[in-house]
Image (cartoon, rainbow, N blue to C red):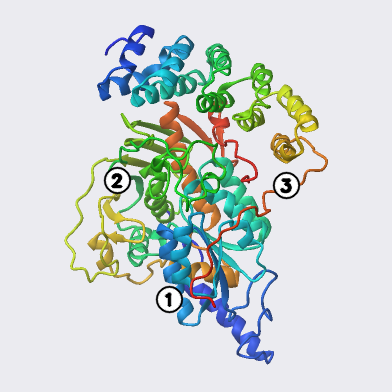
C-alpha cells in the first residue's frame, strides 16, 4: 500500500492480512477527519474483531496526528467528527470517543459532552472528559452538574471541579474511605 | 563523567550513626532504645520492629511477602495485614503471612490501621501512584513496585505527597541494590572507560496477544477494584493478572517494565538522578493484532544536556550475548540475560546484563581493583534493607521517590513520543513537556472516582 487516501485506508483496514491492516491503522493520521465516521462504523459493526479494533485504533491515531502543534484547524475538524459520534448506541465505543475528545477537543466540545452526563452507561465518562477539556465552559457545566446531580454523584463532580482548580464548598474527598469487604478470613486463626 | 559520590556513602552513614551512638553513650542513654524514644514523628526508633502491610500479593507482591515472612521468623519485623482484590490470591497470601495478619480487599481499610508503619505495594502499574499517594496521606512509608507511575501527573503527585508526609519511599528498581551494580558503578565512576557520552539499552520485544473475547470476571475477582483509576471497560483476561503490562493504560510494554530497571541503572551510574532529557524521539511498531497495544519494537533516543550524553532504549536493538560465567560471581544467576545496556566512553565500552533482581557486570568491572585515590560509591545493603534504613534514619533511599518517578517518566515519554509520532521537548526543572499542548494533556489522564490522586 503506497498511497493512503480515504478509499485505500478503508479497504486496507478491512483486510484479513495483518500487515496491511496494521499499516493502514498506523498511517491513518494523514487521512484525517474525513475517515472518522466510516472508521467508526467499522469499529462498531465489523464482524471481524481485529478489523473493528484496527478501525478504533486508526481513529485514535487520527486524533494523535491532528493534535500536533500548528494543526489547530485539523484538530477542530477531528473534534467535530468525534462530537457527531456521541450519539452512537454502542456504549463502549461512546466511552472511547469521550476519551479521545478530552485529548484533542476545545471549548466547543463541552456542551455536547455534558449532554451525556445523565447517561446511565457513560455519564461518568462524560464527567471525566469535561474534567480535562480546556476553557471556562466545562467548569460552568460541571458547576451546574454539581447542583443538579443525584447526591451520590456529587463528590465525583466536586473532585473534577477541584482538578480544574475551582473552589468547591462541601463534598470532601471520599478517596480514602474504604468501601469493599472481603470474606477471606486469616488462614489458621482460631 | 565527573567523579563524584552519588547518594549517601554507607561509610558516611555508619560514621554518623557511630557519632550519634557515642553521643548517646555520653548522655547515659540506654543501649536498647525504647519504642519512640529517639524516633522522629512518624519514624520508628532504630531498634523498633517495623510493622508492615502488603497491598497486592500475587506475582512480585507474593515474592516480597515471602521475603518479609523470613524476616518475621527471625523476629525482625511484624506483618499485620495482607490485601488483594483477588480472594484466591488473598487466601494464599494469608496462608504465607500467618494467622496474625488480617485480610483485606480494600487497601484503604489497611491504610486506616494505626499500627502499620509501612506498606509494600505490588499492584498493577495503574495503581502505583494512587496507592502511594494515599499511603503517604495516611503517614505510611512506602515500597512501591516499578514503574513508579503511569503518567507524569501521577509522578509529580507522588513526589509531592511523599515530601509532605516526610515518608521513606523505595521504588522497586532493585537493580541498584545488586552486588554487581555496585561493582559496575564503581568501575564507571573511576573513569575506566573514560567520559561516557552514550548508553544504549537493549531488550527483546514486547509480546503480541490478548485474543480472548470479553467475559464475566471470575467470582474471586473484584473487577471494579482491579480497574481502580482506569476508565471502566468489560472484563477481559487479556487485561488482568500478569499481562496488564502489555496494555498502554495499565503497563506500557517492556520499555516500562524493564526500562524501569535498565534505565534506572543508567541514571544512577551516570550520576543523572535529578536530571532529565531535553528531547525525546521514538519510532516503533505496535502489535498487528490482539488486545495488547504496547509497542512490540521501539527505539527511543533521550538527549541530555549539561552534561551532554545520549540514552537510547532499543527493543530489540543489538543484544550483546552474555559472558561465560561460573555461577559463583557476586550477581549469581539470572534467568533471562537478554537485556541490559552498553556504556560507550572515549576510552572503551562496558556492558551489563539484567538490571533488576539479577544484574551482571562485565568481567572487567568485577575484577577491577581500586587503587589509591579511587572513588568509592554507595553500596546498598539490599533494596529492602536500604528502605528500612530510610524509614528509621530519614536518609534518602537508593531508589527514592524522585529517582523512581524520573525513571518512570523516561519510559512514559518514550511511549508518548512513539504514540504521537513526534519529537517531544522536556523541561525537567518543571517536569513538563514544552510546546505541545496535546502531549501536555496526555501527561495526565482522568481517573475514576474515588480512585484518584
Q: Chain of mark 3?
A: A
Q: Residues within 10 Å of mark 2 (few under 14, many from 20)?
A: many
Q: Residues within 10 Å of mark 3 (few under 14, many from 20)?
A: some
Q: CA distance from mark 3 to mark 2?
A: 42 Å
Residue sitting farthest toward the right: A169
| In the displayed structure image, the side of residue B233 where residue B347 appears, left or right | left
Q: Is residue A2 above or below residue B402?
A: above
Q: Give coordinates of residue B104: x percent, y percent.
A: 57, 61
Task: Specify the subunit that label 2 lies on.
Answer: B
Q: In the structure shown, which secondary structural element does the residue marked by tag 1 occupy? A: helix
User: Which residue is depicted at the point 54% across and 67% down?
Assistant: A185
Evaluate whether residue B396 shows in this view. Answer: no
Please say if B304 is above or below B375. above
- Name the front one of labels 2 and 1: 1
Q: Which residue corresponds to the image point at 76% horizontal and 35% vertical from the top-left?
A: A166
- B378 or B142, nearer to the observer: B142
Query: Where residue B377 is drawn, which disc sits there?
Result: none
Q: Provide the residue designation for mark 3.
A: A173
Residue ID for mark 1: B70
Q: Identify the mark at residue B203; answer none if there is no mark.
A: 2
- B40 with respect to B212 (left or right): right
The verdict on a common chain for dots 3 and 2 is no
Q: Position of residue B10 (x, y in %)?
A: 48, 72
Left or right of B303, for residue B51:
right
Residue A136 in picture, x, y percent from top left: 74, 24
Give how far apart the Cα atoms at labels 2 and 1 are.
33 Å
- Alpha carbons under labels 1 and 3: distance apart: 38 Å
Amino acid at each position: 500500500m503506497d498511497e493512503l487516501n480515504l478509499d485505500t485506508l478503508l479497504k486496507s483496514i478491512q483486510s484479513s492480512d495483518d500487515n496491511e491492516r496494521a499499516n493502514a491503522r498506523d498511517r491513518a493520521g494523514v487521512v484525517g477527519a474525513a475517515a472518522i465516521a466510516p472508521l467508526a462504523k467499522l469499529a462498531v459493526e465489523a464482524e471481524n474483531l481485529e478489523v473493528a479494533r484496527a478501525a478504533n485504533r486508526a481513529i485514535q491515531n487520527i486524533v494523535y496526528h491532528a493534535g500536533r502543534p500548528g494543526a489547530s484547524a485539523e484538530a477542530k475538524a477531528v473534534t467535530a467528527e468525534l462530537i457527531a459520534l456521541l450519539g452512537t448506541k454502542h456504549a463502549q465505543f461512546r466511552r472511547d470517543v469521550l476519551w479521545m475528545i478530552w485529548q484533542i477537543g476545545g471549548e466547543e466540545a463541552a456542551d455536547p459532552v455534558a449532554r451525556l452526563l445523565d447517561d446511565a452507561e457513560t455519564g461518568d465518562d462524560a464527567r471525566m472528559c469535561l474534567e480535562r477539556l480546556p476553557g471556562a465552559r466545562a467548569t460552568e457545566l460541571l458547576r451546574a452538574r454539581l447542583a443538579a446531580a443525584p447526591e451520590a454523584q456529587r463528590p465525583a463532580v466536586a473532585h473534577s471541579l477541584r482538578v480544574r482548580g475551582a473552589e468547591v464548598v462541601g463534598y470532601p474527598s471520599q478517596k480514602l474511605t474504604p468501601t469493599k469487604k472481603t470474606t477471606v478470613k486469616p488462614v489458621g486463626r482460631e | 563523567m565527573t567523579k563524584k559520590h552519588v547518594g549517601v556513602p554507607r561509610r558516611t552513614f555508619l560514621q554518623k550513626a557511630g557519632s550519634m551512638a557515642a553521643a548517646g553513650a555520653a548522655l547515659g542513654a540506654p543501649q536498647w532504645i525504647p519504642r519512640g524514644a529517639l524516633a522522629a514523628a512518624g519514624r520508628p526508633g532504630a531498634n523498633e520492629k517495623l510493622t508492615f502491610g502488603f497491598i497486592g500479593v500475587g506475582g512480585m507482591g507474593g515474592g516480597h511477602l515471602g521475603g518479609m515472612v523470613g524476616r518475621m521468623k527471625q523476629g525482625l519485623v511484624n506483618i499485620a495485614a495482607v490485601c488483594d482484590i483477588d480472594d484466591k490470591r488473598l487466601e494464599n497470601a494469608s496462608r504465607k503471612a500467618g494467622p496474625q495478619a488480617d485480610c483485606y480487599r480494600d487497601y484503604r481499610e489497611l491504610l486506616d490501621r494505626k499500627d502499620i508503619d509501612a506498606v509494600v505495594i505490588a499492584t498493577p502499574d495503574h495503581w502505583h501512584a494512587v496507592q502511594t499517594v494515599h499511603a503517604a496521606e495516611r503517614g505510611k512509608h512506602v515500597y512501591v513496585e516499578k514503574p513508579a507511575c503511569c503518567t507524569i501527573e501521577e509522578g509529580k503527585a507522588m513526589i509531592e505527597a511523599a515530601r509532605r508526609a516526610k515518608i521513606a519511599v523505595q521504588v522497586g528498581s532493585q537493580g541498584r541494590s545488586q552486588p554487581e551494580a555496585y561493582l559496575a558503578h564503581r568501575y564507571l565512576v573511576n573513569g575506566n572507560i573514560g567520559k561516557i557520552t552514550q548508553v544504549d539499552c537493549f531488550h527483546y520485544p514486547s509480546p503480541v496477544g490478548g485474543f480472548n473475547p470479553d467475559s464475566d470476571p471470575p467470582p474471586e475477582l473484584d473487577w471494579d477494584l482491579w480497574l481502580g483509576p482506569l476508565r471502566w471497560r468489560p472484563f477481559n483476561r487479556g487485561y488482568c493478572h500478569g499481562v496488564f503490562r502489555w496494555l498502554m493504560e495499565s503497563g506500557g510494554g517492556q520499555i516500562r517494565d524493564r526500562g524501569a530497571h535498565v534505565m534506572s541503572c543508567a541514571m544512577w551510574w551516570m550520576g543523572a538522578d535529578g536530571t532529565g532529557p531535553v528531547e525525546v524521539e521514538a519510532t516503533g511498531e505496535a502489535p498487528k493484532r490482539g488486545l495488547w497495544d504496547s509497542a512490540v519494537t521501539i527505539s527511543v533516543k533521550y538527549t541530555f544536556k549539561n552534561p551532554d550524553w545520549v540514552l537510547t532504549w532499543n527493543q530489540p536493538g543489538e543484544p550483546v550475548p552474555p559472558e561465560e560465567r561460573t555461577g559463583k560471581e557476586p550477581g549469581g544467576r539470572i534467568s533471562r540475560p537478554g537485556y541490559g545496556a552498553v556504556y560507550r566512553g572515549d576510552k572503551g565500552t562496558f556492558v551489563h546484563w539484567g538490571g533488576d533482581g539479577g544484574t551482571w557486570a562485565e568481567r572487567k568491572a568485577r575484577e577491577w581493583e581500586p587503587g589509591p585515590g579511587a572513588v568509592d560509591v554507595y553500596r546498598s545493603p539490599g533494596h529492602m534493607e536500604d528502605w528500612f534504613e530510610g524509614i528509621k534514619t530519614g536518609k534518602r533511599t537508593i531508589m527514592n521517590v524522585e529517582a523512581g518517578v524520573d525513571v518512570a517518566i523516561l519510559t512514559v515519554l518514550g511511549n508518548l513520543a512513539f504514540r504521537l509520532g513526534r519529537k517531544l521537548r522536556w523541561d525537567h526543572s518543571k517536569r513538563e513537556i514544552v510546546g505541545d499542548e496535546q502531549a501536555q494533556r496526555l501527561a495526565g489522564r482522568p481517573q475514576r472516582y474515588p480512585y484518584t490522586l
